[in-house]
Image (spheres, rainbow, N blue to C red):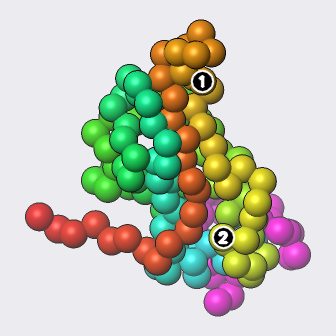
């Protein structure tokens, strides 16, 4: 797909001015990322699956899934009713790594750093309250069904 055409579509969606769109020089890595993420969006979702949970104040249980699009936006209809700011704040690095791999045309699941993340609350045994660990992964796109 033509990077400039994709940039125009993206720019309209996020509200870029003409001047802002023209400020992207040829070869800018942002153009590649916008283009590649546009190609990946209909194919993939990012899932943070609870793999360990104990005494979680938000009620997360093993097997719960928090679903994001490839841009890192929560698909709230596919998420638990309560999203804990402390837990979801840990998703930023793995989502950025996934984005970078998609933008380079690489397998988005083949990253090792922060493949697992956890809430900074380490539980009662560490002077905290509860504990939750998530596995971050890319899956075939999960579509929201219309009710």
Instruction: Residue 74: give x, y in percent of width and height.
Output: 44, 51
* Residue under the image location 63 percent in, 43 percent down: 117
Magenta span main SS: helix
Farthest residue, direction left: 147
The residue closer to the viewer here, 73 or 4, is: 73
Instruction: Residue 57: give x, y in percent of width and height.
Output: 38, 23
- Label 2 residue SS: loop
Q: Kindly report which numbered mark, 2 or 1, lies closer to the viewer in this rendering.
A: 1
The residue closer to the viewer here, 52 or 46, is: 52
19 is within the stretch colored magenta: yes
- Residue ID for mark 1: 122
Which quadrant of the view contains residue 53? top left
* Residue under the image location 57 percent in, 77 percent down: 40
The residue closer to the viewer here, 13 or 81, is: 81
Region in magenta: 1-30
* Residue under the image location 37 percent in, 37 percent down: 60
In this view, 115 is above or below 45: above
Going by the image, does 106 lie left or right of 7? right
Query: Does any portion of residue 103 appear in the rendered image?
Result: no
137 is within the stretch colored magenta: no
Going by the image, does 86 lie left or right of 61? right
Q: CA distance from mark 2 to mark 1?
A: 26 Å
Q: Quadrant of the N terminus?
A: bottom right
Circle on res. 109: 2
* Residue under the image location 28 percent in, 66 percent down: 144
Q: Quadrant of the C terminus?
A: bottom left
In this view, 97 is above or below 131: below
Q: Earlier in the sequence, mark 2 or mark 1?
A: 2
Instruction: Residue 92: give x, y in percent of width and height.
Output: 65, 45
Going by the image, does 3 lie left or right of 119? right
């Amino acid at each position: 797909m033509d990077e400039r055409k994709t940039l125009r579509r993206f720019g309209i969606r996020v509200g870029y001015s003409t001047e802002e769109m023209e400020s992207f020089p040829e070869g800018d890595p942002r153009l590649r990322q916008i283009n590649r993420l546009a190609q990946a969006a209909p194919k993939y979702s990012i899932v943070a699956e609870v793999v360990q949970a104990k005494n979680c104040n938000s009620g997360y249980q093993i097997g719960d899934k928090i679903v994001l699009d490839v841009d890192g936006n929560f698909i709230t209809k596919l998420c638990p009713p309560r999203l804990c700011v402390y837990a979801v704040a840990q998703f930023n690095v793995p989502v950025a790594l996934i984005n970078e791999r998609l933008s380079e045309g690489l397998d988005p699941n083949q990253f090792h750093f922060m493949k697992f993340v956890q809430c900074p609350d380490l539980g009662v045994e560490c002077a905290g309250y509860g504990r939750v660990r998530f596995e971050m992964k890319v899956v075939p796109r999960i579509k929201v069904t219309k009710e």
